[in-house]
Amino acid sequence: MARWLPRSTDLTRFCQKLNRVKTLEDDMMETSFNRCLSTIDLTLLGIGGMVGSGLYVLTGTVAKEIAGPAVIVSFIIAGFASLLAALCYAEFGARVPKTGSAYMFTYVSVGEIWAFLIGWNVLLEYMIGGAAVARAWSGYLDSIFNHKIKNFTETHVGAWQVPFLAHYPDFLAAAILLVATAFISFGAKVSSWLNHVFSAISMGVILFILIMGFVLAQPKNWSTQEGGFAPYGLSGIMAGTATCFYAFVGFDVIAASSEEARNPQRAVPRAIAFSLGLATGAYILVSVVLTLMVPWHTLDPDSALADAFYRRGYAWAGFLVAAGSICAMNTVLLSNLFSLPRIVYAMAEDGLFFQIFSRVHPRTQVPVVGIVVFGLLMALLALVFDLEALVQFLSIGTLLAYTFVAASIIVLRFQQQKGDVPAPAPSSRPNPEPREGPSGGELKEYESFSDKLQLVDRDKSKEQREPGQLKAAFEPYLEFLSDFYPGEVITVAVVTLMVSAICLCSILVFGSTHLHLPTWSYSLLLVLFSLGFLLSLLLIWAHEQQHSTQTFQIPLVPLSPALSIILNIYLMLKLSYMTWLRFAIWLLLGLLVYFGYGIWHSKENLREPRPQCVSARYVVFPGGSLEERVQAVQPSSQPATGLPDTDTDDCKR
């Protein structure tokens, strides 16, 4: 029976396969894509991804039903929370200017299976998001014409009453997706130009709304007679923040486009900062004018802005608002269709997804197969499926991606840069018996000649510490940690931080409602998990991190990514159990794809070294020239009879 059980070495090798990281090319600017996008192009892509139908619908919904005029504060807090995640994307996009966004960032720092699952979730997120926006676009246009399109379809095609299917086929939503797919397939420059047009119209309409809104503003609408500024109190503001947070999820299109940026080291961080700042300002100012134009409790959640102008006697302004809304939704559609095929391309290029999606058209220099296939799938979703039940799924995929990118920033920042060779840890393996060299000094033994070349004179530069090593100031107090390889303690601390954050947020969300914990145990668990989170944070901070980089770096590491992690986990736990159930089913499907295809075709699997039939050890004498220092010795398993002339022995099988 025991012979059928896997050996410990096999399990270790299997776990190493799951957690292997991507090997980056020496020249990361080399690409099969066309590097043609400027900072302005990327900024407008980011604005298009964030300022969509939410500006015209979400502001009125949150103001009336959740926060009142204090929706302004909700957007400020949500904008700051999104900034934490956006800065993580900005650093990665500048340091790793490759397409793939969160998938790529996780692959180069955390591990393969985690990267695949992130990419798998982002894939569904973009498909559902694009199809949902197309249906909203269709419904908004249909409402302008008094629902004539819907009535015609139901009369001549028919209506359905089937679970998970729409009440009627939405041909208009499918058509707009097919048209957008055709434009996206023409190349990045055409997509960017089209996005410029729609973004310019959308921003012009927003500017009109702000000017007219401030002209028609009535401060009495914030007075106590109308319920005051924050009628739902702090709880309403925080609930509004959780909803408003999802208005800013479109900035990752900039990171996904970094392989097509002319100068990604500068353009990506600037574009993310500019687009997030402009989007946050637009949401805040529109919320101000909306709640000042009419009393917040009289708003129409479905078309708040158009209804506000209509009630103030400017019915014609409603058509401008409708035009702006449609243009804004067009930019979101383009953003989804632009990002999705590039993430699929990155997964296919790494061998984790079907190879056909890694093909790039030689003339347009875009992944045309991925654009066409996923454009058709998105159109099919919009045509026949009821997406309202699946829209919440978008939140969990986005928040999970944000969490892993924040954790990846910590791992990457305390990782040694490419080309550095870590000093061997004294306690990581048994010390060999000291050998005496010709000059009477002790011989230092190394595993390979290349390690020896890097470490010959390391003792002379002990004061220069590498990333991942314990800071000199903490060595007297944490001396036992100096025995580990650089980065080992960081990995354990990041895992502990994540577990502590999950437990802490679980107690905050479920402790008094679902778990019904008594006050003393609720308080005790909060204190324990908070201490675990803070101690992990301090342990990470006690180590050296990378500073000598010419690209953008997020400030206050590890504090900033840690705050992003705990916020994202908290928001994920606030989602419904049905969302988690659908998420688990989708993850299981992803694992089937990974273990059935990805793990075997991964390029990192092909790069893994094959078993070698030679072994060698080298010794370094304390004195003498370089040639005199390096001599071969027999493996320690054989009796040492001196220093032989040969430097290899046959493998024992």
Image (cartoon, rainbow, N blue to C red):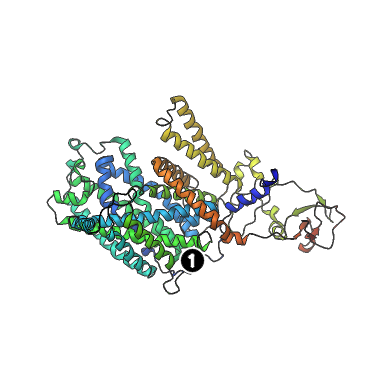
Q: Which of 123/79 is in front? A: 123
Quick one: quadrant of the C terminus? bottom right
- Tell me the residue at 37%/54% (across/down): 128
Within 10 Å of disc 1 (Cα), the crowding (few <14, some 14-19, many 20+) is few
Q: Is residue 196 left or right of residue 622?
A: left
Q: Position of residue 25 (x, y in %)?
A: 56, 64
Q: Farthest residue toward the bottom?
A: 363
The residue identified by callout 1 is 356
Residue 99 percent location from the top left of the image? 46, 61
Give the image location of residue 469, x and y in percent: 61, 48
Q: Is residue 207 visible?
A: no
Image-quadrant location for residue 89: bottom left
Residue 66 vs residue 575: left or right? left
Q: Quadrant of the N terminus?
A: top right
Image coords of residue 449 (percent x, y): 72, 60
Q: Amino acid at mark 1?
A: Ile
Viewer-side residue, 84 vs 568: 568
Tell which of 162 and 471 is nearer to you: 162
Question: Which secondary structure lies at badge 1?
Answer: helix
- Count the numbered circles shown: 1
Residue with the most extreme right position: 641
Tell me if residue 237 can be seen.
yes
Q: Quadrant of residue 145?
A: bottom left
Left or right of residue 341: residue 212:
left
